[in-house]
Amino acid sequence: MIVVMQKGVTVEQLQSVMKRLQDFGFKAHVSEGVERTIIGAIGEKTDEKVQQLEMMQGVERIVPILQPYKMAAMEFCGQRSLVKVGKVVFGGAHVPVIAGPCAVESPEQLCQTAAEVAAAGASMLRGGAYKPRTSPYAFQGMEKEGLELLAEARQQTGLPFVTEVVNPGDVDLVGRYADMFQIGARNMQNYALLRAVGLSNHPVLLKRGLSATINEWLMAAEYIMSSGNEAVVLCERGIRTYETETRNTLDLSAVAVIHRLSHLPVVVDPSHGTGKWRYVPPMCQAAVAAGADGLMVEVHVRPEEALSDGPQSLRPATFAEMMSKLAPIASAVGRTMP
Ligand code: PEP
Ligand code: MN
């Protein structure tokens, strides 16, 4: 439920409501908006508790959260959240771009790609060290060596990196290197993994499942948040439809829907969303116009030699050209891009 405080509520009034919520066994979270202060409270709600809280000084009203997700719901904060990854901020005026190869393949491939995306204005680096491939016979990633190469690329470029973790047992190891965890589409409903990253202090990029509804996606975010980690960024990466011309169908309406239902930032990944590099620049433009809080783009120095997702990877020159065209679109919707 949400406790909406009166305008001009005093610190003492707020503290005593927080104390009462704690005594009632609620987990409470204060959000100070421009107009109002609200408290998001999760716990067992009874009529008596609500009545007593409503009687307290400084309380205007109590509003139940009707959605099955609570901490991920817009009402819980009443305003958009910012998620920070080092100096990079998701959900603010600036729209960060995460770019890099699908998978870390070699020191040269990663180093060159990282330098190119940094020069073109990317804010973060991506690269998979653990690859959950559809086929067990396909390249599965460089694992720990890949993490070491990503850390080296971060040192050379200054870009923080996001990388996928596929096993609860790997969360500690990956967390020793990565700035942000990625939960891949195939693992969006791996609840043991969601809880494991929920117990960590690292921000999490939560990709939408291949056939997940927005409700299921927000419930997955709720798993992470209710485990203690509120730093979740959602990532729309296309869903399964009957269309075969593209690898998936990029659901750009998800950006608008998430912004209504949730306070969490949402980034768009047109590389997996379309599966074909030609469609990536126009869909990046459309995503920024729709209000996306970030982009994720696969870039490879030699896509024709890529061990995974070559057909959807941009060459560095195409990436740089695309980046140079995003600023006016961002500015038209009140955002900034490099
Ligand atoms: C990836 O980012 O390379 C990836 C595997 O993405 P998804 O989980 O969205 O398929
Ligand atoms: Mn990929």
Image (cartoon, rainbow, N blue to C red):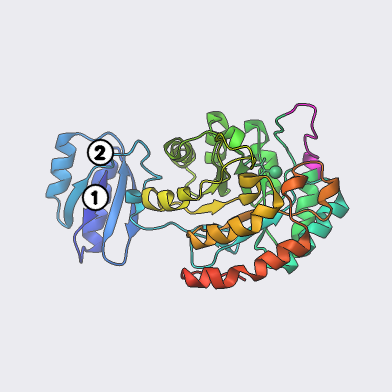
Is residue 98 visible in the rendered image? The answer is yes
The residue tagged 2 is 24
Q: Position of residue 224 (x, y in %)?
A: 49, 39
On the image, the x and y values in percent for residue 99 come to: 69, 56
Is 320 covered by the magenta stretch?
no
Quadrant showing the C terminus:
bottom right
Q: Is residue 297 visible?
A: no
Magenta part mainly helix, strand or loop? loop
Q: Is the shortest distance between ligand 1 and the CB of mark 2 under 8 Å? A: no
First of labels 2, 1 by sequence position: 1
Q: At which x and y percent is residue 28?
A: 33, 46
Q: CA distance from mark 2 to mark 1?
A: 14 Å
Q: Residue at x 35, y 35 (%)?
A: 68
Task: Give the quadrant of residue 31.
Answer: bottom left
Residue 323 badge:
none
For the residue labelled by badge 1, is the local secondary structure a helix, a strand or a loop? strand
- Say which quadrant the N terminus sits in: top left
Label count reads: 2
Q: Are marks 2 and 1 in contact (CB under 8 Å)?
A: no
Q: Is residue 295 or residue 240 the one in the foreground?
A: 240
Quarter where residue 328 is shown = bottom right
Residue at left offset 19%, top offset 34%: 46
Magenta residues?
Answer: 135-145
| Amino acid found under the numbered disc labelled 2 | Phe
Q: Amino acid at mark 1?
A: Val
Q: Residue 3 has which mark?
A: 1
Q: Quadrant of residue 161?
A: bottom right
**184 left or right of 135?**
left
